[in-house]
Image (spheres, rainbow, N blue to C red):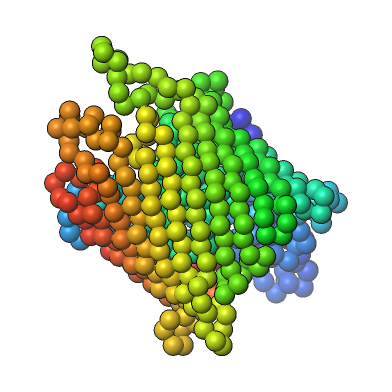
């Protein structure tokens, strides 16, 4: 499996430029003696059936006060994504291939805040990897979709357009779900093999379900891409029902309501040991969540400008999970500042409830944990150009779970995003 992954990466980085070269005329080549990687990358977009995206996010976060330690860190994230329309390329009707290479660098700012929910949604172990590689087949006029391969659960499950503007990871997928399992579910930064089925009952109503390998990656090797299939890993089963507006545009007509659930088939240690203080093993682990978002109102002269709201709640099995409940909500306003039509101002709060059994267990180790952790985030996305965004971000953490020295942490960061 490791060799297969290496070959896939080689195909992406070496063979793809060949396709782009086919789009160059001899006249273009003679006029341009020096061809850069970006030239080759951009020329891919002229090749029928291939979509290419290159995205860079870099940020500096500082723990200004409180938390574990006052310190500044830099981190970044690179996404190189290729979409292949196999119907256009080889005549395979309804088929699509996706390849996603991911690169991460830098420190995790949550280490200095003590927040269990994290601070940045690009914080990860320093490495390059093949993050996603899947084949999708659409059938029956695209009512039915089948997907197989390395797949990010959070690319389709537990997603919201409104909450995607925020940097804190809890607004991407709820912490009561993200912090489960032996290495998390199949989400950033570790993905696993999956089979996903999606059926569109109507243009607005769909149901989807997926089966994943129970432990993404390799617990002993955080770097690179690893697909390890063990019987003890079990499976992750997840499903979601969504009702949303027919338009995908984020404007006054947009809304989305979702309800989902998940289940691990493997064994987990309960927080309550037996009489001899040996850990008890429980078969399975489960949770449910619900979310809603709606564009509340738009400005009279532009339906894409205005106020939007999101809400999310989730609950997890109290026997085995540190966080047994999550509550999140937030507001965004697009185009609030005159003349800045595409800028976004956002305010959100993410709240986790720590399992009382976990609190009691940590108290025996003389480590006090509060019932709730709250993170309030204020952010502003400055859309400098279509390819460049700057995002200053403030996060105030009440009761950071892993910090016993302060009851708060105040984080400030600035993100730079380049999209090519």
Q: Position of residue 390 (x, y in %)?
A: 41, 71
Question: Residue at (73%, 56%) from the top-left corner?
Answer: 202
Question: Residue at (57%, 39%) from the top-left corner?
Answer: 238
Q: Position of residue 254 (x, y in %)?
A: 58, 68
Q: Is residue 38 visible?
A: yes
Question: Residue at (67%, 55%) from the top-left corner?
Answer: 205
Question: 386 or 140: which is nearer to us?
Answer: 140
In the image, taking residue 170 as reference, residue 5 lies left or right, namely right
Q: Can residue 414 be seen in this view?
A: no
Which quadrant holds the C terminus? bottom right
Number of numbered discs: 0
Residue 132, by quadrant, is top right
In the image, taking residue 287 as reference, residue 362 lies left or right, namely left
Residue 123 against residue 41 in the figure, above or below: above
Residue at the top extreme of this rendering? 276
Which quadrant holds the N terminus? top right
Q: Where is residue 242 in the image (x, y as percent from the top left)?
A: 61, 53
In the image, taking residue 304 as reference, residue 108 lies left or right, namely left
Question: Residue at (46%, 88%) from the top-left corner?
Answer: 339
Q: Position of residue 234 (x, y in %)?
A: 54, 25
Question: 82 or 296: which is nearer to us?
Answer: 296
Residue 230, by quadrant, is top right
């Amino acid at each position: 499996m490791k060799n297969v992954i290496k070959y896939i990466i080689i195909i992406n980085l070496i063979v793809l430029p060949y396709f782009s070269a086919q789009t160059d005329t001899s006249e273009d080549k003679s006029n341009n003696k020096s061809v850069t990687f970006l030239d080759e990358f951009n020329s891919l977009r002229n090749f029928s059936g291939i979509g290419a995206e290159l995205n860079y996010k870099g940020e500096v976060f500082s723990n200004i006060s409180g938390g574990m330690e006052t310190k500044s860190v830099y981190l970044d994230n690179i996404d190189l994504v290729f979409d292949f329309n196999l119907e256009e390329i080889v005549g395979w009707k309804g088929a699509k291939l996706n390849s996603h290479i991911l690169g991460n660098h830098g420190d995790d700012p949550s280490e200095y805040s003590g927040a269990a929910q994290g601070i940045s949604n690009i914080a990860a172990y320093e490495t390059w990897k093949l993050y996603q590689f899947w084949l999708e087949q659409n059938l029956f006029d695209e009512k039915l979709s089948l997907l197989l391969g390395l797949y990010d659960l959070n690319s389709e499950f537990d997603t919201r357009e409104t909450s995607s503007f925020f940097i804190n990871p809890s607004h991407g997928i709820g912490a009561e779900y993200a912090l489960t399992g032996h290495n998390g579910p199949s989400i950033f930064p570790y993905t696993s093999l999956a089979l996903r089925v999606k059926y569109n009952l109507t243009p607005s109503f769909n149901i989807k379900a997926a089966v994943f390998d129970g432990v993404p990656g390799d617990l002993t090797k955080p770097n690179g891409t690893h697909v390890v299939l063990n019987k003890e890993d079990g499976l992750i089963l997840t499903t979601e029902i969504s009702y949303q507006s027919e338009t995908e545009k984020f404007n006054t007509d947009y809304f989305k309501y979702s309800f989902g659930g998940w289940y691990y088939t493997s064994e987990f240690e309960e927080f309550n040991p037996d009489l001899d203080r040996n850990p008890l093993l429980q078969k399975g682990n489960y949770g449910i969540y619900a979310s809603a978002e709606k564009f509340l109102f738009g400005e009279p002269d532009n339906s894409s400008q205005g106020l939007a709201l999101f809400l999310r709640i989730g609950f997890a099995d109290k026997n085995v999970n540190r966080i047994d409940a999550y509550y999140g909500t937030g507001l965004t306003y697009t185009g609030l500042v005159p003349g800045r039509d595409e800028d976004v101002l956002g305010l959100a709060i993410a709240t986790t409830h720590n399992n009382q059994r976990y609190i009691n267990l940590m108290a025996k180790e003389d480590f006090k944990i509060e019932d709730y952790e709250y993170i309030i985030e204020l952010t502003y996305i400055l859309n400098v150009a279509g390819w460049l965004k700057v995002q200053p971000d403030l996060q105030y953490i009440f009761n950071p779970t892993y910090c016993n020295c302060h009851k708060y942490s105040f984080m400030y960061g600035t993100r730079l995003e380049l999209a090519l």
